[in-house]
Amino acid sequence: ASTMTVAAIEAEEVDQLRWTYDEETISLSRQDDTWVNTEDDTMPIDQDKVSTMLSALSSIVSNRKLDTPEDLSIYGLDTATCEITVTEQDGTEISFSIGDYNSVSGCYYLMYNDTIYLVDETLLSAYSVTTQDLIAYEELPDLSDTQSMTITSGDNTLTLIHCTENMEEF
């Protein structure tokens, strides 16, 4: 089956991302070369996750389109599984709605510019992201050879010492 390009959005052109998935709406904006949560700019964002999301927009292809769609509820687009809005640097807003899975074709219904397409799971997989999924967690160093550790919080200090012998000395 032949495929057609539905949309191809260059990551460098995107200034804002907003999507709703699992009843949660998340908005990110680009500040220089870093993506930040517009609701909480102190939240550490996993920049690699955002890169994956942007990459999914670079080539959205379909093997079938429905030019005259029937009632949107037939395709699960009346209450979409995922709604995505991209704002480009020039202010252009591009919106996508992902609906139900079609088990016969093995594809999802996607609405873009009032046309419904059948697409694979790539876009939904990239945007089935919650706030918790976006958090960039700090990595702990390898502690396998650590002999002691001191933790200080405020006025409190805790020292941990790795003992392999007689603990009565401590």
Image (cartoon, rainbow, N blue to C red):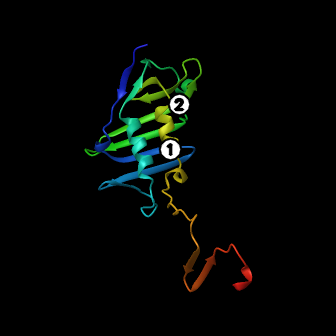
Q: Where is residue 108 in the image (x, y as percent from the top left)?
A: 52, 27
Which residue is drawn at the image coordinates 44% and 40% (left, top)? 84
Q: How far apart are marks 1 and 2 (CA)?
A: 12 Å
Depth check, front residue: 26 or 48: 48
Q: Where is residue 30 in the image (x, y as percent from the top left)?
A: 34, 53
Asked if residue 74 lies left or right of residue 31, the reply is right
Please, is residue 56 above or below residue 50 in the view?
above
Q: Where is residue 144 in the image (x, y as percent from the top left)?
A: 58, 63
Q: Residue 99 carries which label?
A: 2
Residue 69 placement, left or right of 5: right
What residue is shown with label 1?
20
Image quadrant occupied by the N terminus: top left
Quadrant housing residue 55: top left
Which residue is more in the foreground, 68 or 130?
A: 130
The count of marks equals 2
Circles 1 and 2: CB atoms closer than 8 Å: no
Residue at the spot 70% in from the left edge and 75% down from the top edge: 165
Q: Earlier in the sequence, mark 1 or mark 2?
A: 1
Which structural element holds mark 1? strand
* Vertical position of residue 160 compared to residue 5: above or below: below
